[in-house]
Image (cartoon, helix red, strand yellow):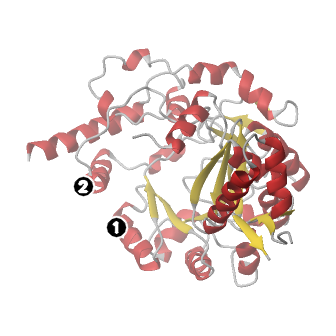
Amino acid sequence: MGSVKRIVRNNQTAWQQVEENVIVVTNQTRKMHILQGIGGRIWELLENSINQDELIENIQNEYDAPPWQIQEDVERFLKELSEKTMIEIIG
Amino acid sequence: MKTIWDKVKQDLKQKAIPLNVLIELTRKCNVNCCHCYNFKDNAELSFDQVKKIAVQLRRAGALFLSLTGGEVFTKNDIFDICFYLRKMSFDLSIFTNGTLIDQNNINKIQDIGLSEVGISIQGSSAETHDKIVGVKGCFGKSINAIKLLKSKKIPVNLKCTLMKDNFQEYKQVMELAADLEVPCIIDPIISPKDDGTKDVLKHRLDDEQLFSFFENQLSQVQAFDKVEDDFTCPAGIVMASISANGDVYPCIQLPEKLGNVFETDFKDIWTNSVFLNKMRKNHKIKACADCRLIDYCTRCPGLAYLEDGDAFGISSIACLNAAIYEKIIKGKTKK
């Protein structure tokens, strides 16, 4: 059975995409983060609340790597974003 | 070792992305500071106008917006504006005198998600502060605002313009900030008014006071970093300013009008301005090329423009400050 986790950007962040970089500022920690490449693409996909499986599937379709590898990497990345208060994982 | 952020910053600078934009929401003000540089024409931006500006700024790459005035909380639509800008994912800070922040609106201010609120405090006593801002009772209200903001965990700092009128108590202002547990920014810069008149400069510290202030501030500094170029200032490169009637400037302190956002898109103004492109070329100031004080110089193109008539020329106040810095630093070295 698939994950029912939904991912949303933390609305306390501020961000801007400047060419290939996404600059994210977290209000709680006042830290600046730079997302590049797939990280930036994931941030883009979080424009609206999205199911974690759906997000992973999108990345699997867009990037050339073993699906299990992408799943692991994306899950780890989302956990990191959550720890840095950039996103909220619901469910 | 350079971090990713260092590399991104360099890239932003090279591409002149206006990451930081100061928006003058209104020139209306409920106080009357003796050293104010602003026009007194009550111009202000409507909520609809701010929305148009925000869309243009987003497209141009802006991230950090600072709202200033006049006094921004005199605007009835200030909360609509702030919530809208935050919804557009801008990082938002506000400069205010704090007199209109109270128990009735503090929760709403907290909800905005501001990254910083700068409160101007011009003295450590009500007598000095109220005299400078021209309205009795302001000091207590501004201090109360700082306490309220702190109680809601909203980042707040105390900003003080140092002048002859409050010089005698700037150390007490620093102590006040320490007591309130907020950062303190003391700035001795007083600019000529935007209409070109210079009578406000009479409030500037004299040389002896400047020396004393810089000496105190530099007590932890061993030497100045060598100035790499004459335009280390971010104005016109990664920093822009938009006035209460939509005029675009490199900086609020450099009132060289580049265009108006209600006539031309901000990005076009920012990209195609002849003045900005000249600033960005990073060329040396010819008149300063052989100056022995160059290592101590913190030249501001805006003050050079306002006081000496040429953003690309000598800044007399920078020359004065540099001479003082040199004297202090050399004095420290001799010891």
Which secondary structure lies at badge 2?
Answer: helix
Same chain check for tags 1 and 2: yes
The residue at which mark 2 appears reads as B219
Q: Could you tell me which residue is drawn at 40 percent across and 74 percent down? A: B178
Q: Is residue A52 left or right of residue B327?
A: right
Viewer-side label of 1, 2: 2
Q: Find residue B21 and report its horizontal and vertical position in percent.
A: 68, 45
Quadrant (top left/top right/bottom left/bottom right) for the C terminus of chain A = bottom right
Quadrant (top left/top right/bottom left/bottom right) for the N terminus of chain A = bottom right
Amino acid type assigned to the residue bearing label 1 in the image: Lys
Q: Could you tell me which residue is drawn at 27 percent across and 48 percent down? A: B211
The residue at which mark 1 appears reads as B171
Work out whether B270 lies above or below B63.
Answer: above
* Of pointers 1 and 2, the one earlier in the residue sequence: 1
Callout 2: chain:
B
Work out whether B287 lies above or below B205.
Answer: above
Q: Is residue A69 visible?
A: yes
